Image: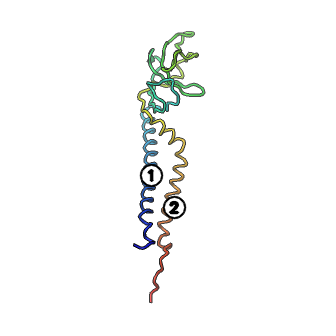
Amino acid sequence: MSRRGQGRPVRWVAHAFATIVALAVTATLIALSFGLFAVRFVGLDAYVVQGGPTEPALPIGSLVLVAPIPSNAVRVGDLVTITLPDRVITHRVVAIEQDDGRAVFMLRGDASASPDPVAVQPSPVVGKPWVAIPTLGYAVNYAEAYSPPILIGLAVWILVVITVRALTPYMSTSRRRMPA
């Protein structure tokens, strides 16, 4: 084998590896996007657990699918996901009390010893956690944070590959024999 051809198997392996990684990342982003779209299409919401007040029921990094429920269906002991002005939280209902003729929920995180200091009116209740998928929330956060640069990089990579393949016949370094 000539010296010039010795580096080609390494380049081929590196190219194949880069292609496989790019396709795997793309397939994962597409699968997560379609999965989240399908979840929303059937009426569920998806949230990522960022803190530990509901551990061990909902570990940090879990993807929680929340089903909407009417406020009169909430019972003491249920986990509920509520929307506050600055965040969305999932806590357990420890009491349902009456305040001016309206029901209010007293909530507590499973990892907390005491109830939350503020009673919550039923209107911000989003729903009840239906299923929690441990660690998938990390992938969702990653996809949300890095999908634009990954997709732009992938588009640039595809354009470069198409360009190089189109120009390869014109970039040959071997000497061509001129017809005699």
Provide the residue designation for mark 1. Answer: 21
Which amino acid type corresponds to the residue marked 1 in the rendered image? Val
Image height check: is 33 above or below 101?
A: below
On the rendered structure, is 119 left or right of 1? Answer: right
Residue 30 at x, y percent in the picture: 45, 46
Residue 29 at x, y percent in the picture: 46, 45
Crowding near the residue tagged with mark 1, few <14, some 14–19, many ≥20 C-alpha atoms within 10 Å: few
**Residue 47 visible in the picture:** no
Which numbered marker is on residue 46? none
**Residue 174 visible in the picture:** yes
Image height check: is 18 above or below 51?
A: below
Residue 38 at x, y percent in the picture: 42, 38
Residue in view at x 43 percent, y 68 percent: 6
Residue 166 at x, y percent in the picture: 48, 67
Quadrant of residue 32 within the rendered picture: top left
On the rendered structure, is 121 left or right of 77? Answer: right
Viewer-side residue, 5 vs 59:
5
Nearer the camera: disc 1 or disc 2: 1
Mark 1 to mark 2 CA distance (whole Å): 16 Å
**Which residue is situated farthest in the bottom direction here?**
180
Residue in view at x 51 percent, y 41 percent: 142
Which amino acid type corresponds to the residue marked 2 in the rendered image? Val
- Local SS, label 1: helix
Viewer-side residue, 49 vs 16:
16
- Local SS, label 2: helix
Crowding near the residue tagged with mark 2, few <14, some 14–19, many ≥20 C-alpha atoms within 10 Å: few
On the rendered structure, is 32 left or right of 121? Answer: left
Q: Quadrant of the C terminus?
A: bottom left
Which numbered marker is on residue 160? 2
Viewer-side residue, 141 vs 9:
9
Return the disc, 1 or 2, that comes first in the chain's sequence.
1
Q: Quadrant of the N terminus?
A: bottom left
